[in-house]
Every structure is written in structure tokens, then in C-alpha cells.
Amino acid sequence: MAKQFASIEPNLRAFIERQHIFFVASATAESRVNLSPKGLDALRVLGPNSAVYLDHTGSGSETAAHLKADGRLTIMFCAFEGAPMILRLYGRGRVVRRGSEEYARLLAAEFGGVEPAGARQMVMLDIGMVQTSCGYAVPHFEYQEERPGLTRWAEGKGEEGLDAYRREKNMVSIDGLPTGLFDDTE
């Protein structure tokens, strides 16, 4: 049932672009495995072996810590509507720092130059393997809308409040690994 590909084929890219949610998994050899759901139209396929997502401020920054220490990253999509399928992108990830030239270029080219409230960084994935599987056990769900809570929270905090929050909550992982969030800015 599972099929492996060296890159994202056009039909798989179309599948990815229709999804409203994706999941990001990362770990180091000694850390807990982190699995996070993502939405808010944050992911872009850049090419057959490259994708990026705009990472929003959250209660932790596990993925950044794991990428800094190890680099392994998996992104998974599930078909909740239409034909069943699970698609995983396996590869090596890295953080693109907010405020960097690369961040500005990607924001302009892939996100229309619009930085949403609470944007923290981008996560780039260099894809080594793509795998699909049946997804027969994934239930049907109907998409209604994006939840506004995270955006409202970030807007309410403002830039200074977000900076303070990130310094309090996003500097180390739950396992004490540094995230590197402010490495290039201090």
C-alpha cells in the first residue's frame, strides 16, 4: 500500500496544496518526540525536494531545538476529505530566522509579502524521500474555517509582548535543548 518517491510529483503537490492541516514531527536521539499540528495556510512547496512553512509563536519551540541539535524532520498530511491518503515528507530541516534576508525573500515570494501576527520564523525542509500510504483509517472531516484565536492572541500581545513571550517560553525545549531563536539577533 505504501509507495516511495524521490521527490514531490505534480499530483502529490496538488494534494498538499489542498490540505488545511499538516503535522510536523521532530526529535533528537535523546529527546522526546514532538508532533505538532499546523494550519493557517502556512506551508508552501518550493520545488520537488523543498518545502517551507511559516512558524507561528507558540507555547514551545520544540522543532527549532530539534533541528538545531539533529536536523531530522517529517511533515505529514492526511486526506480528511475526498479519497483517502497519507503523505509524508522526510528530510532535513533548518530554521530561517525572522529578519534575515532569506526570510524576507521567502515572505515576499511565497506569502505575498504579508507577515501574519505572531510569525516567529520559517522552517525549511530539504526532502530526501516522499511516501504515500492508504489512509483508509483516517476519518472524514469537513473543513469549516481557520480558528482565529492564535492570530487574535498575537495581535493582542503586540511585537514587544511577543518578544518577551518568546524569550520566556521559546528559548529552550521541554528537554532543555536551546532553540537558537535569538542566536542571529543578539
Image (tube, rainbow, N blue to C red):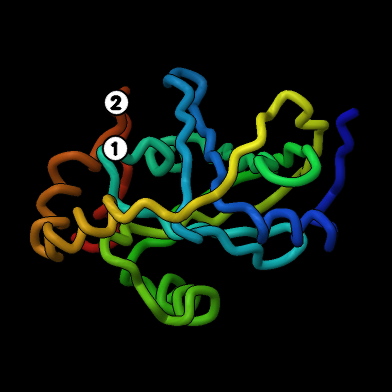
Numbered label tally: 2
Q: In front here: 7 or 178? A: 7
Q: In the displayed structure, does residue 67 sit left or right of residue 120?
A: right
Q: Residue at x 26, y 35 (%)?
A: 172
- Asked if residue 90 shows in the view, the reply is no
Label 1 to label 2: alpha-carbon separation = 8 Å
Q: Position of residue 154 (x, y in %)?
A: 21, 57
Q: Residue at x 19, y 39 (%)?
A: 169
Q: Residue at x 44, y 57 (%)?
A: 40
Q: Position of residue 13 (x, y in %)?
A: 75, 59
Q: In front here: 92 or 168? A: 168
Q: What's the mark number on residue 174?
A: 2
Q: Name the quadrant containing residue 81.
A: top right
Q: In the displayed structure, does residue 11 sit left or right of residue 94?
A: right
Amino acid type, mark 1: Gly
Q: What's the mark number on residue 60?
A: 1
Disc 2 secondary structure class:
loop
Find out whether the residues at labels 1 and 2 contact each other: C-beta distance under 8 Å.
yes
Amino acid type, mark 2: Ile
